[in-house]
């Protein structure tokens, strides 16, 4: 039987690079919409407890995953494995949005290890 009571009115969270909202969350997985403003990028980061699946729904994204840098158009997707270093960027003058599906044991902000980023944030990386 499908569960429908976990859908909520998403709250948009503003960030220096754009915004995100959580559409649905349940133990082990979440559905997020992420918008990256023109010319902006997220910090280079990794997660120890979750993998992610990204699908572009508006514009063009640039995904850095490990040593690969991949341009993604609407409908294209990429997977990020647990522990893989990654970054999301919008190198165009147009809006960019994707749907992110993180899945794993820890899905909150405590599972983000960052390298220095454009917004001045840094969290020490654990080896």
Image (tube, rainbow, N blue to C red):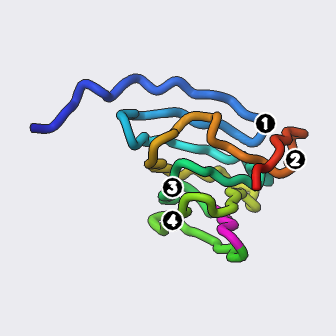
Residue 63 forms part of the magenta stretch: yes
- Residue 118 numbered mark, or none: 2
- Residue 16 numbered mark, or none: 1
Residue 17 x %, y %: 75, 42
Residue 7 x %, y %: 32, 28
Which is closer to the viewer, label 3 or label 4? 3
Residue 51 x %, y %: 51, 55
Residue 104 forms part of the magenta stretch: no
Which is closer to the viewer, label 2 or label 1? 2
Q: Which of the two labelled residues, at mark 3 and mark 2, occupies the earlier sequence position?
A: 3
Q: Which of the two labelled residues, at mark 1 and mark 4, occupies the earlier sequence position?
A: 1
Residue at mark 4: 79
User: Which residue is drawn at the image coordinates 39% and 34% (left, top)?
Assistant: 24
Measured in 3D between alpha carbons, the distance from the residue under mark 3 to the one under mark 1, in whole angstroms, is 24 Å
Q: Tag 1: Cα neighbours inside 10 Å, few (<14), some, or many (≥20)?
A: few
Look at the numbered discs 2 and 1 and tell me whether their residues touch, using CB distance below 8 Å. Answer: yes
Please tell me whether mark 3 sits on a helix, a strand or a loop: strand
Measured in 3D between alpha carbons, the distance from the residue under mark 2 to the one under mark 1, in whole angstroms, is 9 Å
Look at the numbered discs 3 and 2 and tell me whether their residues touch, using CB distance below 8 Å. Answer: no
Measured in 3D between alpha carbons, the distance from the residue under mark 2 to the one under mark 4, in whole angstroms, is 24 Å
Please tell me whether mark 4 sits on a helix, a strand or a loop: strand
Residue at mark 3: 51
Q: Which of the two labelled residues, at mark 2 and mark 4, occupies the earlier sequence position?
A: 4
- In the rendered image, the vertical position of residue 68 relative to residue 15, given as above or below: below
Q: Which of the two labelled residues, at mark 3 and mark 1, occupies the earlier sequence position?
A: 1
Q: Which of the two labelled residues, at mark 2 and mark 1, occupies the earlier sequence position?
A: 1
Residue 29 x %, y %: 40, 43
């Amino acid at each position: 039987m499908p569960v429908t009571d976990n859908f909520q009115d998403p709250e948009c969270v503003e960030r220096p690079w754009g915004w995100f909202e959580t559409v649905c969350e349940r133990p082990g997985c979440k559905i997020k919409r992420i918008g990256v403003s023109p010319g902006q990028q997220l910090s280079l980061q990794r997660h120890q407890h979750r993998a992610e699946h990204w699908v572009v729904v508006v514009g063009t994204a640039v995904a850095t995953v490990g040593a690969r840098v991949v341009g993604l158009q609407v409908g294209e997707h990429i997977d990020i494995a647990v522990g893989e270093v990654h970054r999301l960027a919008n190198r165009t003058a147009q809006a960019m949005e994707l749907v992110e599906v993180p899945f794993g044991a820890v899905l909150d902000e405590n599972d983000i290890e960052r390298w220095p980023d454009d917004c001045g944030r840094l969290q020490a990386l654990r080896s």
